[in-house]
Image: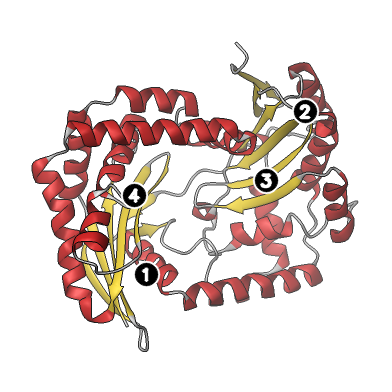
Amino acid sequence: MANRVHAFRHRGLRVRYQHLPGPLTAIALVVRAGARFDRRHPGIAHMAEHMLFQGTASLDQLTLNRRAAELGGEHNADTGYEDISLTIEVFNEDVPAALALLAEQFYHTRVDPNRFRKERRVVLDEVRSRADDPGDYLHTQGWCRFFGGALAHPVCGTWRSLNELTAADVSVFLRRCFVHANSVLAVVGGVALEQARSAVRRHFAHGNERPAPPAPPVVAGSAGQVRLRRFGGSQASVSMMLTVTPSAREIVAMGVALDLVGADPDSRLFQEVRERLGLGYDVSATLDWGPDWAVAIVSASAARGQRDRLLRTVADTCQRAAAEGFALDELQRARKKIRYRYASLAESRLNQALALAEGVLSGFPTPAEAERIAAQVTRAEVEAAWRRAMTGRALTVVLAG
């Protein structure tokens, strides 16, 4: 089968390979070392991600980034609560060189104090810009109340935590977390399996027997309603955060329910907020999860004077869906949209590689398996998932200017 996923290990590193015909191959190296693992240094994982591009033992910052450009590839990284992903997409013939570059970053990133201080200023500016955005402010404040413990801080950290962070702290973090047992490498594209396997063995040869660091526990935070104020703002925003059971089938069912309730033009909340009442422009519905946690977030905004009306609309729409359930034609539309999203994912080598690697770390099914679950999940399961979320621990955050 042309799209079969091949799995193998090399010195404890889990590797996933999928052949997709064409001239390009995407590579995702995903390490379970996201913000959940920050411990006493909120923001250290995100800072470590930035330092991956600031130079290694043998390549300075400019040489490293020029090397990526010489490959003609898209070279990037991202940090979430569960993992740090390092990605590159190149021509098939450049896969060995691309793997060599990722291995250099994985094993040999050097946290030079001068480069660290410069890059910390960049991240502090990012924190400042996020704090100035009402939507980001609402999400951050809600998230840090809904969760306690290891998830109860922004991925980027805070102004105070970043200023207390040192280059030595980041070096220790990289040594502790960037180990084979904690990582998955996914290769998706036109490169041949044996060529990819040979390059992995050659360039990822420095693995050791160090175990993956244990994941700090996820702690439940607040429930109920929180009201926030930001003086001078012209908008009111509402965000409802719902606890979701962290199992693959439940997450897929909840994703279908969010399609029906949430932000698309045919969804119930969009029609209520934007079309029937004309309250505002922004409506969103998202689902985030890790191996042992999941949260659904439904949000909307309106003019500052419409705060209470917006709050009632979001609450009533969500509660009515739990009471009445969903119509068969709604479910059919949601299934078609989900099929489209998975088809789009399959067309993107980079997104497919990320999904394969992240799925291994989180225990979530492969994209193909998740698509099959979405096609099989029944209307009763979708309705039950939504009702469980609506009757479980929930937090509503209201922001007014």
Q: CA distance from mark 2 to mark 4?
A: 42 Å
Residue holding disc 4: 264
Q: Are marks 2 and 4 in contact (CB under 8 Å)?
A: no
Q: Secondary structure at mark 2?
A: helix
Q: Residue at x 27, y 30 (%)?
A: 332
Q: Position of residue 187 (x, y in %)?
A: 68, 29
List the residue tagged with mark 1.
Answer: 138
Spatial CA distance of label 4 from label 1 is 21 Å
Looking at the picture, which amino acid does disc 3 mark? Answer: Leu
Counting residues from the start of the chain, the first of labels 2 and 3 encountered is: 3
Label 4 secondary element: loop
Q: Look at the picture and state if 83 lies above or below 142.
A: above
Q: For mark 3, what is the residue?
A: 86
Going from the N terminus, do you reach mark 4 or mark 3 first? 3
Per the model, the C-alpha gap separating discs 4 and 3 is 31 Å
Q: Assign a secondary structure to mark 1.
A: helix
**Residue type for callout 4:** Asp
* Of the image marks 3 and 1, the number of the one nearer the N terminus: 3
* Residue 204, visible in the rendered structure: yes
Q: Position of residue 292 (x, y in %)?
A: 38, 41
Return the x and y of residue 282 as percentages of the image width and height: 35, 64
> Callout 2 environment at 10 Å: few (<14), some (14 to 19), or many (20+)?
many
Mark 2 and mark 3: span between their CA atoms? Answer: 15 Å
Which residue is identified by label 2? 200
Q: Is residue 363 left or right of residue 327?
A: right
